[in-house]
Amino acid sequence: MGRRRHETCPMLAGPPPAPLAVALRGLCPRCGARGLFQGLASFASRCRACGLDFAAFNVGDGPAAFLILIVGGVITGLAIALELSASPPFWVHVLLWVPLAAIAVIGSLRVAKGLLLALEYRQSAREGRIAEREG
Ligand SMILES: [Zn+2]
């Protein structure tokens, strides 16, 4: 597997970061600079270091519905288990599961979106479509 050099871009010293590093640390998939995410789980418009247009990657919120179902299932299971074993008052459930669900959804959404963007970047880069300008 030959690793192609990015001779077109002077910003790049080495190979792009691994998709998992992009997802977990919010790195630019091309140059590895921080700042992929602008909000909790939304991308910045472009990389501040190399100018890669993050908006061009159509990751969307595809993983959101899927992740909410998974997180919802896990949280519900945990809530039922807690209720059956300890039967705490209702406010304990609210205090526990509402923030936990929010954190779990946002966290997993960040990772999923970052991973998708990184994989899409690699795919596009290999096919040489990344330099194409769109509207
Ligand atoms: Zn960059």
Image (cartoon, rainbow, N blue to C red):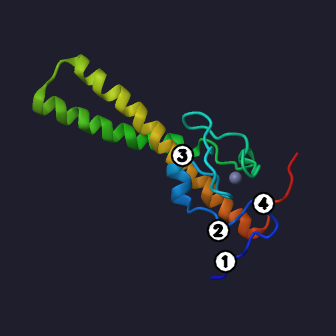
In this view, the mark in front (1 or 3)? 1
* Gap in angstroms between the C-alphas marked 4 and 1: 17 Å
- Mark number, residue 3: 1
* Gap in angstroms between the C-alphas marked 2 and 4: 16 Å
* Gap in angstroms between the C-alphas marked 2 and 1: 8 Å
Q: Secondary structure at mark 4?
A: loop
- Mark number, residue 63: 3
Quadrant of the frame with the N terminus: bottom right
On the image, which quarter does residue 46 sit in? top right
Q: Position of residue 106 (x, y in %)?
A: 48, 37
Q: Amino acid at mark 3?
A: Pro
Q: Position of residue 52 (x, y in %)?
A: 75, 51
Residue drawn at x 61%, y 57% is: 118
Q: Is residue 126 above or below residue 102?
A: below
Residue drawn at x 44%, y 38% is: 105
> Where is mark 2, residue-wise?
15
In this view, the mark in front (4 or 3)? 4
In this view, the mark in front (3 or 2)? 2
Q: Is residue 54 above or below residue 68?
A: below
